[in-house]
Amino acid sequence: MQLVLEKRAERSNTIALVSPLIAIGLTIVTMTILFAILGKNPLLALHAYFIAPLTDSYSLQEIAVKATPLVMIAIGLSLCYLANAWNIGAEGQFLIGAVAGSWIAVKTQGTDAGPWVLPAMLVLAAAGGALYALIPAICKVKFGASEILTSLMLVYVADLFLDYLVRGPWRDPHGFNFPTTAEFDPVATVPLLIEGGRLHLGSIIALLVVAAAAILLGRTIKGFEIRVVGAAPRAARFGGFNSNQLVILTFAVSGALAGIAGIIEVAGPVGHLQPGISPGYGFTAIIVAFLGRLNPLGILIAGLFLALTFIGGEQAQIAMKIPLDVTKVFQGILLFYVLACDSLILYRFKLVLPNRQVARGTH
Amino acid sequence: MQAHQRMLDPTPNGLHSGESPLLQTLGLTKRYGDFLANDSIDIDIWPKQIHALLGENGAGKSTLVKAIYGLIQPSAGEIRWQGQPIMLSGPSEARSRGIGMVFQHFSLFDNLTVAENVALGLDGKESFKDMSARLEQVSKTYGLPLDPKREVWQLSVGERQRIEIVRALMQDPKFLILDEPTAVLTPQEADQLFIVLERLKAEGRAILYISHKLEEVKRLCDTATILRGGKKVDTCNPRLETAASLARMMVGGEIKEVKAAAGRKTTVPRLVVNDLSLAPGEAHGVRLEHISFELKGGEILGIAGVAGNGQDELFAALSGERLSKDPGTVVIEGIAAGHLSITQRRKLGAAFVPEERLGHGTAPRMKLSENALLTGHAASGMVHHGFIDTAATLKTVDRATETFDVRKAKRDPEAASLSGGNLQKFIVGREILRNPAVLVVSQPTWGVDAGAAAVIRQALLDLATAGAAVLVTSQDLDELAEIADRIAVMFHGHLSAPLATADATREKLGLLMGGSSLEPKEAAHAVGA
Ligand SMILES: Nc1ncnc2c1ncn2[C@@H]1O[C@H](COP(=O)(O)OP(=O)(O)OP(=O)(O)O)[C@@H](O)[C@H]1O
Ligand SMILES: [Mg+2]
């Protein structure tokens, strides 16, 4: 007996819709087993992960705060992926955006610079992220270098560059030698939406980005171009669309969005530049993009869901001493299942029984 | 009921071996939403028979054979194999029972050898060496010469089809289905195929044969089942029918004659090609060598030739999918356009219909309205300030549907869900409705039924009458004779000087297609040889 994957004659639209849900279900089953192996009560652990964070306002706000960078980055990544451009380096673009925006914050520190500072930081962060993303894009278009590798490798460059800045030139002189800049001035800080709460303006920006992406993909010729280049490259060329230009464009846009997400994180929840500003947002956003079916609304929902796992992971660590890294395991398993379930849209499982095979040979 | 069926089956001489048909469908139905692609079809397949399946584009022929081959699940009805009801869960099960199928679109890997391609398509677990030996044996037995070590890209369309047939035969099928096998073959290749089919029949196998070429059906087939609008409307002996009477049964009415309007006038040159040479863009392409011609408004120029002699490369150079360094090599409407993109050429008034419908002419998984936008975005008022005017794209779909009688399950389906011929009608319609000044079209009626082919050819003639310049590449010499004013032949990247259609005899074209020239000296030499 043999289990084989067989191509479906028709694409299954039902599976296309429910595949993320199947993936989440399978992930939860796998996690249950994992918790049991770790010697934790699976039911309590799952409760801590998925239910507890939804029960108090602080956690709810925190979910929105964590979802903000995830959604913003994932929207940019979805544009790349739709166009068949594989940007894996959003984490690096996020960090470079944070650095570029922080430059103004650091330079205007303690001066009486006006309210232009924050908008200027956002613009610079976008530019920084975009330029950084253009490196792999241009290498791909000009030299045929794999954008998957180059964009990924640039993450580590960005990480070390940030490290150098906060340990060297930008270190807070009154910071007891901690590798961090001084706390940003109020004009260089993302305003809160609720006084004394956690929710900040960045979440509104993320919602605007979602809306803009929905309009771009659904209503504009540029969005059509992105979809058709990815879905049918030869037909796209026949339509007059240039896939190289699109690689450049989608990388630039996704770099810019990651950069903005970076500076919002630094100038918002964190308040200063330091290493470790991202718990891997740029990588988790890849999962968000696929779990959300590369669809803006789907990404918004998927972003909130993955933010929940971050918060849930923290609660499970506090309440049950489950290591924080289990969250990463969870996210990895989830991506695995999402991609695996997606193949069921075009393929199906089939059991081949040996007795069905007839004797062959020409007579 | 069954006895009644049997009575209607006009099998010559009542030659049925065995008591029951080899394969039988009873009330086979396939529904797509509200649309009935197959509506309660009964068909009996007997051994030792070539059974034709006829019908207009979209009549449901491919749907029926896909259900028999296990590729799609019927919504209702029954399939009986040697009298026993069966449920096929997929093609591998159909193959293991003895049902083989050769698709119109080949599934071969260009960079693999013949033997490797065959190995990939077989379910068995025999060693590669045994398989290669068996491949050679089968291909020798049936007179289908194939070199197992050649890579597929080096092979002609006919040879590629041979791989598919040999692959099917290696499973020793009792029943072989061929979906439009001759649509892409030259007449000589088709003749070779018929010999093989006759032989398979003599061996006692059953064959189900789909074709739009009624003359060859008359020549080859013992029985014909005719579908119309998803229903079986008739069963007959094609040998006792004429092509016209078969066509009438398919359409349920008369087919219009293609008429060239009298007094078509040629005007100014609209498409001029000057000494165009172009290195191939792909590893296995053909180099274009010093191609020149001039095409005036009101004129149709036909390009004949065996596929793979540079027709694809010429199409790419004319459309702007490939650019040439010298702008003057391609002149559209008096403007040097060799360096212009396909979008800019469209803005100059040119329109293009490539040979391959799915993946080149359309994005298969996108809706028809989006595929209208694919070529219409530049110059058809479908985009305002970067925003898509969905109403305008849908209007194009509706107009093409109406003008060219595109049959589909709903208003705006995915391109891939259309039957082959209906998609072709949509693509041609989409371009003609833009009122182009220059239309470059490849294989306009591949896989299109007789009625629809007439509609498309008439549309090309009407377009020329309205003043457009039309360039038609086709392997079908009858088609070129019917609509072209002049015919040129493509061979090894060279284009012959065009002949007036009246002078372009089959002999002359045949010589040119084989690479000979028509110079008197050479011709004499050819006769002497
Ligand atoms: N997946 C699908 N979804 C919706 N409609 C479909 C699908 N597949 C086929 N159809 C419809 O079923 C009808 C029959 O299609 P089919 O491919 O069987 O036609 P056909 O007789 O083979 O025509 P042709 O000669 O053009 O190949 C068509 O109108 C087509 O639009
Ligand atoms: Mg068909």
Image (cartoon, rainbow, N blue to C red):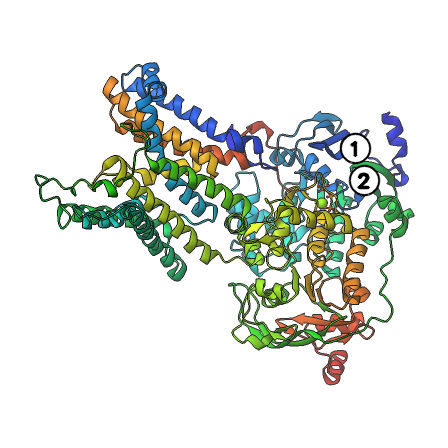
Please, what is the three-letter code of the amino acid marked with disc 1?
Answer: Ile
Q: On the rendered image, what quadrant is the C terminus of chain B found in? A: bottom right
Residue B291, above or below A187: below
Can you say whether B265 is above or below A95 in the image?
Answer: below
Task: Bin the neighbour count of mark 1 within 10 Å (Cα to Cα): few under 14, some 14-19, many 20 and up.
Answer: many
Residues tagged 2 and 1 counted as in contact (Cβ below 8 A):
yes
Q: Position of residue A56 (x, y in %)?
A: 33, 19
Res. B291 image quadrant: bottom right
In the picture of the structure, the residue carrying the numbered disc 1 is: B41
**Pointer 2 or 1: first along the chain:** 1
Q: Position of residue B201 (x, y in %)?
A: 77, 44
Front residue of B504 and A182? A182
Please tell me whether residue B125 is drawn above or below residue B289 in the rendered image.
above
Q: Is mark 2 within 8 Å of ligand 1?
A: yes
In screen coordinates, is B419 left or right of B216?
left
Is residue B124 shown left or right of residue B225? Answer: left
Q: Which image quadrant for residue B429?
A: bottom right
- Position of the N terminus of chain B, as image quadrant, is top right
User: From this viewpoint, which residue is outermost toward the bottom?
Assistant: B521
Does residue A309 appear in the picture of this structure? no
Q: Quadrant of ligand 1?
A: top right
Q: Residues within 10 Å of mark 2 (few under 14, many from 20)?
A: many
Residue that numbered label 2 is attached to: B227
In the structure shown, which secondary structural element does the residue marked by tag 1 occupy?
strand
Callout 2 secondary element: strand
Determine which of the numbered discs, if any, sits on residue B208 in the image.
none
Q: Residue at x 80, y 44 (%)?
A: B55
Looking at the rendered structure, the kind of residue marked 2 is: Leu
* Residue B150 x, y percent position in the rendering: 55, 58
Of residues B494 and B129, the one drawn nearer to the viewer in this rendering = B494
